[in-house]
Amino acid sequence: MNKSLNQRLAILATLYIAQGLPTGIFNQALPAILRSYGVSLTIIGLTSWLAIPWALKFLWSPYVDRFFSPHRGRSRSWILPMQALAILTLIGIAFFNPYDLATTKGIYYFFFLMFLLNLFAATQDIASDALAIRTLGYEERALGNSVQVAGYRFGLIVGGGFLLYLVGVWDWQLAFLLLAMLMLLISLPIFFYQEPVVEVSPSEEHLSYRQVFKSFMSTSAFRAWFWVLVTYKVSEGLGSAMVKPMMIDMGFKLQQIGLFVSVLGSIATLLGAFLGGALTRYFGRYQALLWFGLLQAVGIASYGFLSWQWHSMGHIAAWLVYSVNALDHFVSGLATVALLTIVMDQCRRDHAGSDFTLQVSILAIFGGSAGLLAGVVTDLVGYTAYYLLSAVLGVLFLWPVLLWGRWLRR
């Protein structure tokens, strides 16, 4: 691996760690924190709305591609201010009183801060993805996506599991101030990075806002790929929404979830991400996407087994929960690398941020919105039936992958 590639991968790793930190708070820590303060499953399920910037970020992605400072760089012009705003928001959360979560006014204020944190992270993501696409060649993308997923998951470990552990055994304010300091430190590499200058093609430079999306979505390649984007992450979105609340109901403490569940799970995702990059190159994009999708469904079904047999497992129960959670995260890492590698392949160089963001927004809209029903359905049918239903949907929703594979072989 040459020095230039090492530098590019290192910069991307820090950017996705910075992205994973706030996302870890929202996805990993927030459900358990809310449940520990007595918030209902229905309200926890509705917090998926706070992630709407991730679903709708395609709406402003063309502006991120088009407007920038040539001196600062196309991507750095957006990454630096977004990470600065995220740091300020983390400081604001640090001075929030967690006991106010029991009040309507308090929970609205906290949700507003979490919404802002997601907004800044989602906008940073547009610029970071564009930087990755413009600086990585075709053969480098599987490895690049391994680093992307691994960096993101490492951020989840810190923002999710490590935060839960600190909040459980330490102090709320100091825990969030520490996260703000870590965000500042990992912002230093991109601050000193000299971003390569990329010229915009004259034919693409003057496309209108509408034409940017229309010219991309009108291709036969995108039409064949679209239904994969719609369905591939629905099952995972359903399954992941109720994992932490289920563990709270099983009697796990925040520090247990933070250390043994979130941290071990994220480490398993790191391993899955690195192996996923190698296997995607070895098997090819299509085969990796299909088989890793099936493994994802198996991981989700395992939670149904846990909830069914939990009371009869005895002293091994806790470690079986940790193991199943690690398995689920491992296969998720495999599948995510294969998926994002293909997403990157679809992108045009001049509209890298817009094209990539549109695709991951489709993933977020359908995968994330599935979680809105999670609390309601779980309250109605229980954890076991809920997870088995999610796994069955995961298998059925691989049908578009088969159709896309047929289109590739034409």
Image: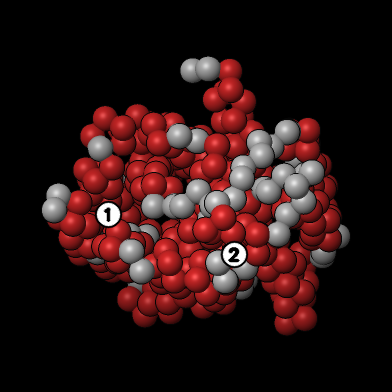
Disc 2, SS: loop
- Mark 2 residue type: His
Dot in front, 2 or 1: 2
For residue 12, which quarter of the picture?
top right
Q: Which of 241 and 55 is in front in this view?
A: 55
- Tell which residue pokes out farthest to the top in this image: 2
Residue 409 spot, x, y in % from top left? 14, 49
Disc 1, SS: helix
Residue 158 vertical placement versus 42 (above, below): above
Residue drawn at (62%, 68%), measured in percent from left and top? Answer: 60
Residue drawn at (51%, 44%), measured in percent from left and top? Answer: 133
Residue 255 spot, x, y in % from top left? 62, 46
* Horizontal side, residue 246 vs residue 166: left or right: left
Residue 400 spot, x, y in % from top left? 22, 62
Q: Report which residue position mark 2 lands on.
A: 206
Label 2, label 1: how far apart the Cα atoms are: 44 Å
* Horizontal side, residue 314 vs residue 28: left or right: left
Q: Is residue 186 visible?
A: no
Q: Pointer 2: residues within 10 angstroms few (<14), some, or many (20+)?
A: few
Residue 343 vertical placement versus 117 (above, below): above
Q: Pointer 1: residues within 10 angstroms few (<14), some, or many (20+)?
A: many
Residue drawn at (28%, 63%), measured in percent from left and top? Answer: 220
In primary-sequence order, the first of circles 2 and 1 is: 2
Residue 140 spot, x, y in % from top left? 44, 31
Q: Which of 315 and 155 is in front in this view?
A: 155
> What mark, if any, has residue 48 been given in the picture?
none
Q: Which of 55 and 250 is in front in this view?
A: 55
- Mark 1 residue type: Ala
Q: Nearer the viewer, residue 47 or 151?
A: 151
> What mark, if any, has residue 297 been given in the picture?
1
